[in-house]
Image (tube, helix red, strand yellow):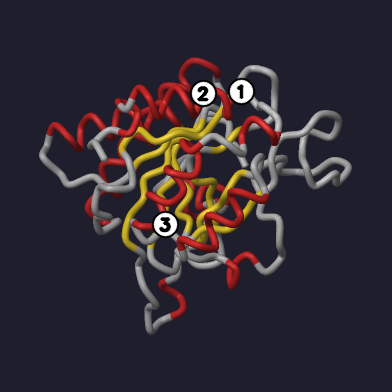
Amino acid sequence: MSAELGGQSGLRGKLSHWLRGRGPKDTADDGGREALLLAAASAGLPLAPAAHPAPGYGCSCDRVGCPTPARHPVSFAWQTQSTTDRAQIERWACHQPQANFITATGMVHDVLDVPLEAGREALRRLLDSGVEVGPVAESDDGRMLFFTLTRGTPEDEDEWWPCELDCHPETMDEHPGLRWHCRGSYVLVPPARLPGDDGQAVHWVRGPEHPLPEPLTLLETLTDACARHAGEESDRTGAPWPLRH
């Protein structure tokens, strides 16, 4: 597998059919999606099936007013269901050909989730500085996901940092726009389709073959980029950077 999954033109071509929302009969024969899921599992990311985009309500769960369409697990037991077992993931991929997948954080890995513009700036700076950056995914709805090692299980529960740090006033100034997905959280894992007719998706920028780094090696650069872009957005609009949840 190459360093950049996006560079595999054959695999990318197969995936384009699935990402355009083709039906179960077409997607069942598409090996590109399954290959990416198995690559993520092989890298140690525990996976579980998630909802997918659907007409009408916008989410396959059929919940009226679903707050996170196509972005949530199918089962309430997703934390215990999440696995890296190849055979299980192959069964899920075969029997649920339209399903997105989530990866449960706080077990093996965490995810630093930042606004897309800030993430792209931070990624350039980190790579230019020679910092080891692990897998990175982009979500076309405006977020960038940096996959890192988990912080483990601190002896002091007060050391647990919550997800969606940007929704807590006491952390807003220090970590504007940053969400740290750890224990009890999850993110969509590529390839994933988002609701809408414009083909939005979640895709790898740097694939899961890259080793997971320590999160603190990325945090300063990420928060600095978030603060810079939050300030620029505030200067342009006169309002704080809009938060996405």
Q: Nearer the viewer, residue 182 or 3?
A: 3
Dividing the picture into quarters, in which one does residue 80 lie?
A: bottom right
Q: Nearer the viewer, residue 161 or 206?
A: 206
Disc 3 target residue: 41
Dot 1 or dot 3: first in sequence order is 1
- Of the residues shown, which amino acid type is indicated by label 1? Arg
Q: In the rendering, at what x and y percent does residue 110 appear?
A: 40, 58
Dot 3 or dot 2: first in sequence order is 2
Q: Specify whether 225 is left or right of 16.
A: left
| Residue at horizontal 62 percent and vertical 54 percent from the top | 49
Q: Nearer the viewer, residue 208 or 90?
A: 90
What label sits on residue 173 in the rendered view? none
Extreme-left residue of the structure:
130
Q: In the rendering, at what x and y percent does residue 123 appear?
A: 27, 34
What separation in Å lies between label 3 and label 2 (alpha carbons)? Answer: 21 Å
Disc 2 target residue: 16
Dividing the picture into quarters, in which one does residue 99 lie?
A: top right
In the depicted structure, whether residue 54 falls above or below residue 148: above
In the depicted structure, whether residue 197 falls above or below residue 102: above
Dividing the picture into quarters, in which one does residue 225 lie?
A: top left
User: Under tag 3, what secondary structure?
Assistant: helix
What label sits on residue 20 in the rendered view? 1
Extreme-right residue of the structure:
64
Q: Are marks 1 and 2 in contact (CB under 8 Å)?
A: yes
Q: Residues within 10 Å of mark 2 (few under 14, many from 20)?
A: some
User: Under tag 2, what secondary structure?
Assistant: helix
| Residue at horizontal 70 percent and vertical 43 percent from the top | 68
Q: Are marks 1 and 3 in contact (CB under 8 Å)?
A: no
